[in-house]
Image: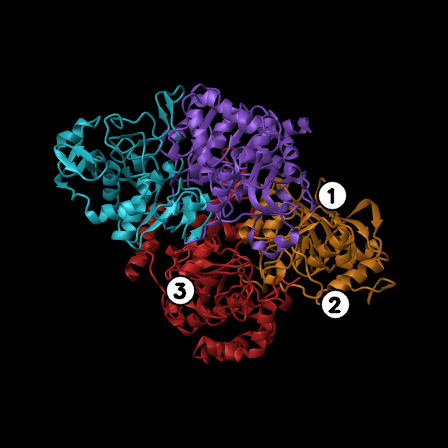
Chain colours: A purple, B red, C orange, D cyan
Amino acid sequence: MAQAKREGRALSGYEALRSETALRDRSLHEKVVSLEAAAALINDGDHVAIGGCMMSRTPMALLWALVRAGRRDLTFSRSIVSSDGDIVVASGIAKKVITSWFSQGIVWGISRVMRHWVESGTAEFEEWSHLAMGLRYRAAAMGLPFLPIRSLMGSDVQRRLSGETREMICPFTGEKLVLVPALRPDVAIIHVQRCDPYGNAQIDGLQFMDIDLPMAAKRVIVTTERIVSNSQIRRSPDRTKFPFFVVEAVAEVPYGSAPHECYGLYEPFFRHMDLFAKMTKEDPERGSRDYLQRFFYEPRSWNEVLQRIGMDDLLTATSGGRNVHDE
Amino acid sequence: MAQAKREGRALSGYEALRSETALRDRSLHEKVVSLEAAAALINDGDHVAIGGCMMSRTPMALLWALVRAGRRDLTFSRSIVSSDGDIVVASGIAKKVITSWFSQGIVWGISRVMRHWVESGTAEFEEWSHLAMGLRYRAAAMGLPFLPIRSLMGSDVQRRLSGETREMICPFTGEKLVLVPALRPDVAIIHVQRCDPYGNAQIDGLQFMDIDLPMAAKRVIVTTERIVSNSQIRRSPDRTKFPFFVVEAVAEVPYGSAPHECYGLYEPFFRHMDLFAKMTKEDPERGSRDYLQRFFYEPRSWNEVLQRIGMDDLLTATSGGRNVHDE
Amino acid sequence: MNEIGSVTRSWTTSELLTVMASRALHDGQIVFAGVGVPLLAATLAQRLHAPGLTILFEGGVIGPFIVPGDLPPSTNEQRCTRRANMVCPITDVLMLLQRGFVDVGFLGGAEIDRYGNINTSFIGDPDHPKTRLPGSGGGNDIASLAHVIVAMKHEKRRFVERVQFVTSPGYLEGGASRHEAGLLAGGPKVIITDLAELGFDPVTKRMRIEALHPGVSVEDVEAKTGFDLDLADPLRVTAPPTERELEMLRELDPDRLYIA
Amino acid sequence: MNEIGSVTRSWTTSELLTVMASRALHDGQIVFAGVGVPLLAATLAQRLHAPGLTILFEGGVIGPFIVPGDLPPSTNEQRCTRRANMVCPITDVLMLLQRGFVDVGFLGGAEIDRYGNINTSFIGDPDHPKTRLPGSGGGNDIASLAHVIVAMKHEKRRFVERVQFVTSPGYLEGGASRHEAGLLAGGPKVIITDLAELGFDPVTKRMRIEALHPGVSVEDVEAKTGFDLDLADPLRVTAPPTERELEMLRELDPDRLYIA
């Protein structure tokens, strides 16, 4: 398996994509696993794409399990990274983060954790524009080697990525276009509101890049607030955002995005996010070590993490989350 | 206006696209018009993209109004064309149909109407693959001059379109790719289940190419089963499939897709479709003349068209339509 | 009832095609199916030997299940969404072909040639056609990007040396020509007719008889084919449709819309 | 309270920036806004003079309306969707920029230079940065594809001759260089600071003072700018924030999260 995987990586081009995809088990079958078993499906060195964006639908419980499992040398990619980025670099599981924006959040200023680990060269932060990230995943989802983009040109963002992008002259218009390469994660980890045991996933509200991500990745692991029956999924098939056959495992994890939000169910746990910012502000190294100790290493289950975050924060976030369409 | 339009057409490339788009009124304002007024927004010679697919969510009432208005030299494009294609060629409003498949429907055999008008050279049927049609609209929706595709190659479909497509060698993989050019209709006409007075359109069930189409076109006209309040739209903004600012006019037309279907509301009017097939089978010219006379020219309102189609057919279609999620 | 050679059979040609096509499908596959024989074949396979098989419809439907007696008129109306797992835009469902998630697509055609190229566009000169056919639809995309099963009646005018127009590419001029044209995946796999199952030589990509239906001879097939066919070695004989297959099939299409 | 030159004003710097930015927006425009000053400015404009103005958020939100006192923490959480007309994928909302539907995008930055290039990535050598900043986000896309309004505090270390890293392109090296680089649309339009409004010479694309806020002199601006500024002719003086503007603004942000 590990051998096949390494070979798969060495391959490139369409034929490799096709044979790799053909080998995936795409049959309709149940694939419910525990959170810990889901984390065990991710290997050292994998490129892991994180679903959601910023503080929303972050698969935080799965990241918690990955940190505890002591995975190493992971590359993470995501549209925009918040404290999830801080945690994967501070815990040492990430060697690289590919994203368009990396900080806890505007209201907390520039992340000291990101700064410490990136400025020291311990973790790499590879910067693309937000649209470029989106088109890279979309190219992969479309089975294409690239997509053209009209931004990036002239900037140092592109210059710094020069080995990665190409330019072409459009044969129809004579205009210059930048080509951004398909980004094909080894694993996409995506948190959703509901999913059936086969992996049919439904997402309410903000979708971010989570329609393209599961189609782009080589494997997909879903965490879900609730596992629902296939019948419930079939009652509104136009709400299914990605199909079962791309999914390898489904784990039910209520509040699996805490302390980030899950649309319609809970808002970000702002007080807890303040706590994280405060703990890591003065001494990011010690602060994040303390934070990880208290909320990642000591709790033996995700429920225990939630207990430590506390009922007050959880209920406040829930109350806010349920107000989403309240005018 | 007509002058500006002709100039706009002569232009090509991104700068033309940008200036044309910048000139559109994209403000949040009400734009409800009658069916006839909606038809009057379409000019002779326009390229009109038809939303929906086959016998589903066809903006038939608007086509009825266009035929009655005696518009000329129109080019139509659509993912797949059913009797709507027969009607636009038989009525003489279309000089060209760009699509991937053109016939009334598999169960009725090859359309005699399509055959008669196309084989005689009166109307042109330009054939693309279905995915190519989709990617052409999508390229336009993305503000790109083309998208790459991995089909078409080696076929006579591509050969016959050779002036239209390009080939390139991928600078990342060395593989050959076909480039299909953006298809930018002058007007997209789209029928939906509900839309607010500003043009925020929500589509249930099958979406076909109707997410890309309105973003691709230079102007968009929506017909809707029901005009709903903006508040109702805002209660589920993730069901809005295209935004108000691309829409120029909204007309409320219940059963506006008859005798085709509208998901969740009514199925195709099969008996009426049989009638159309029967009338046009022996002598497509006389048959479609008779059909148009009876169901297009004589009725003075869409309601009268529905009356002529008849209550029985309407109720049967409605009963079928409402059963969509009935197992 | 249906008579070929000297054997009288208790099934129609469409029933035979459907049963044989269903057997060509395997559990766990993802299958692009049109209405009619393809959809019936895929559904039959699901019910008999491939419960984990997934159907895709061109209209943008993933994992539907048809309701017996309520067959959809095409792949683009709401009946196609019955009990579906997902509904999505057309371009995205077709993209699954390009992404490589689809194992098999079903195609038919007015003509097929020795290299499995299919014509659904023109009979006669495309500029002045004798018959303008409905065209590619998703056929070109399916044929370009997936393995293809063809189910069609065996007639000399349909099995031709060279199709008049390549709507959906097979192995083009044979040999490596498909790959050289840039089509790096897929290709025709099996042609199921009322007489035989035909496949392609792995190297030359010429069509060959793989198996004969019971009571059919090589000569019977040759008589209805417009070019020389190679023969697979060994040449199999298919098992006739079973009672169970036919019963199940007739349950699916009680009005005999597609199996008459 | 806020003191500049000799005039005492009854507004904060953020309030001034917000009011001036709101005035730069017109009815019917489609505006890409981040949280903070941009969102407040766009909302203020909607309520005062641009009721048909549409806000877009990077998280995939079209036409939201913020709830006073319940401001979103970023453009990517559910608070951003309050009273929205549409929610869509991020890639698609950013695509509106490329398609040309967006009139104006708001940007800020650590540094801006004489040609309106913005740095939000690195202070110091990118390979060994003194400070790694959060990066582009949608900034590069907005700056590449739309007209840009920048609202930022006027400080010498922020208004520099040449940014250390071009995250979001302005007019690059000036003149036609932006167009030549392949950026065929958009570009920085106005820079609003606590001292002045700055624009760009139509030909050289060098930054110039277009208007001074009341009580501010050209020298005040020059003293806080790291390069020579051109002057528009005539040089306007802006009207101070009105009571109505300030009241409305304070209603929107009663906790003074962004206007303190």
Closer to us: mark 3 or mark 2? 3
Q: CA distance from mark 3 to mark 2?
A: 43 Å
Residue at image mark 2:
C254
Give amino acid for label 1: Asp
- Which comes sooner in the sequence, label 2 or label 1? 1
Residue C183, image x and y in percent?
60, 42
Label 1 environment density (alpha carbons within 10 Å; few <14, some 14–19, many ≥20): some
| Frontmost residue, D240 versus A161 | D240
Q: Say whether residue C32 is visible.
A: no
Is residue B264 rendered to the left or right of residue C232?
Answer: left
Label 3 environment density (alpha carbons within 10 Å; few <14, some 14–19, many ≥20): many
Is residue B274 rendered to the left or right of residue D210?
Answer: right
Which chain is home to disc 2?
A: C
| Frontmost residue, A118 versus A4 | A118
User: SS at mark 1?
Assistant: loop
Quadrant position of the C terminus of chain C in the picture: bottom right
